[in-house]
Image (cartoon, rainbow, N blue to C red):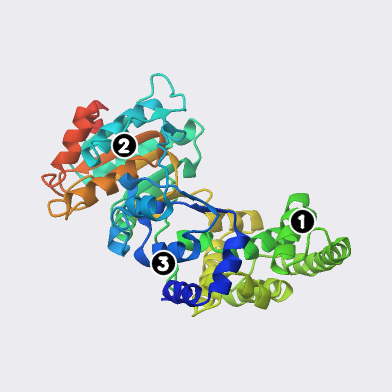
Amino acid sequence: MIQRLVELLLRVNPLITTALRITYAHVFLDEFQDTTKPQYQLVKTAFQGADARMTAVGDHKQKIMGYAGAVEKVFNLFDADFSAARRTLRFNYRSVPELVRVQHELSLAIDPATAPAQSQRKGTPNVQTCDVWEFASTGEEADHLIRFIGEGRRSGLAPRDFVLLVRQKAEEMEKHLRPFLSEHDISLRNEARKLDHGVAIQELLSEPLVEFVMSFLKFGAVKRGQQQWRTCCDLLALVRAVDPDDEHENQRLQKELGAFHRVLHSQMQTIPASIEDINKLVRVTLDFLPEKMMKAGVPQYQQGDWYAKVLNDCCQLLWESCHGVNRWTDVFDRFEGVNDIPLMTIHKSKGLEFHTVLFVGLDDAAFWNMDRDRKEGLLAFFVAFSRAKDRAFFTYCQDRGARRKVDEIYQLLHQAGVSIISPVAQS
């Protein structure tokens, strides 16, 4: 609704449109394949016929937001409305050559005209990059995941070098896997879990409010920290709209920041003992910024109750992160999930990348509608596969479901030389 109102405002007030156009010489539109009709109309009204150089980047093979209203053939509209010249980006800087080769086989099923990409990465010799793992039971599956992750950790991989991907129902997978992993000291975090006020953990960590709060808490937790000082100084100048060239104002800002640090550091000598203590600590930080300026600088905080939801869920996750630890560094690591294996859905993984992707449940239960919407299923699988930088493995359990509906995916993997193996039989 807000997008439509903004578009109407631009359409009926040419002075605003003119001001917008002379402000921006370049407009970059990322993830363009998932553009909705209101989003596209807003861009068109704002910049069609303007002198700004328009660049739209996207991949129609990763269009998985159709359910949210993504426009079909939006690149064709852009070509016509902005007289665009198409350029094909042929270099893949994420995935190793073997994964890029398999990705191309999948790409051809989505668009037979897809040109092959060239990997700019070097693969590791004698390291298996892609298999489907077949198990008789989910218990066998969990045991193998534990062994595999453990071997990776011992070889130097960090927890967040891995990701456990599911098509849907991350909560059910979390309930199933967590007990197995916990027995072997492997911490799992469901990034799709919604906190008390409805904000998912992954969304929360990307919020500007959370970035500001956590930066200042990290600043207050240490007696001296040059990096934290520089970060907070820059953030404070941003919130208060201080000109970088205004030497007097910047000196005053730094003096205020030094005084605030002494107050904050004194209040962070112990880990909070209650959610109320967390709320008070966060409130001290927001009063210093101040909160009013924070809201004014972030559009999504100016309408509705999103700001309040983010703030409350930030405090909740902070409180959860305090349980059983006595150092602030441990609190911050828990909050950010530094030592956790992330579990997320394909949609939530969009735009991210991981050394090793472990897709759990390549079966009909996950791709339940593929017989009715083949393309959507292939697009989702391609997005999951393309998150991997070095390795991608997929699991199938006989007691979880059949694989009749996803037979095409298995056939494509087979054509690409991906093997179906039974790790239990090989061990």
Q: Residue extending furthest top?
A: 125
Camera-side residue of 277 and 379: 379
User: Which part of the image, by quadrant, shows the C terminus?
Assistant: top left
Q: Which element carries disc 3, helix, strand or loop?
A: loop
Mark 1–mark 3 distance (CA, rounded to whole Å): 32 Å
Mark 3–mark 2 distance (CA, rounded to whole Å): 27 Å
Q: Residue extending furthest left?
A: 404
The amino acid at mark 2 is Phe
Classify mark 1: residues with Cα within 10 Å, few (<14), some (14-19) or many (20+).
many
Residue that numbered label 3 is attached to = 194
The amino acid at mark 3 is Lys
* Residue that appears at 42% across and 72% down: 198
Q: Position of residue 222 (x, y in %)?
A: 75, 56
Camera-side residue of 378 and 156: 378
Residue that numbered label 1 is attached to = 229
Q: Position of residue 329 (x, y in %)?
A: 64, 54
Residue that numbered label 2 is attached to = 393
Sequence-wise first label, 1 or 2? 1
Classify mark 2: residues with Cα within 10 Å, few (<14), some (14-19) or many (20+).
some
The amino acid at mark 1 is Trp
* Residue that appears at 61% across and 75% down: 279
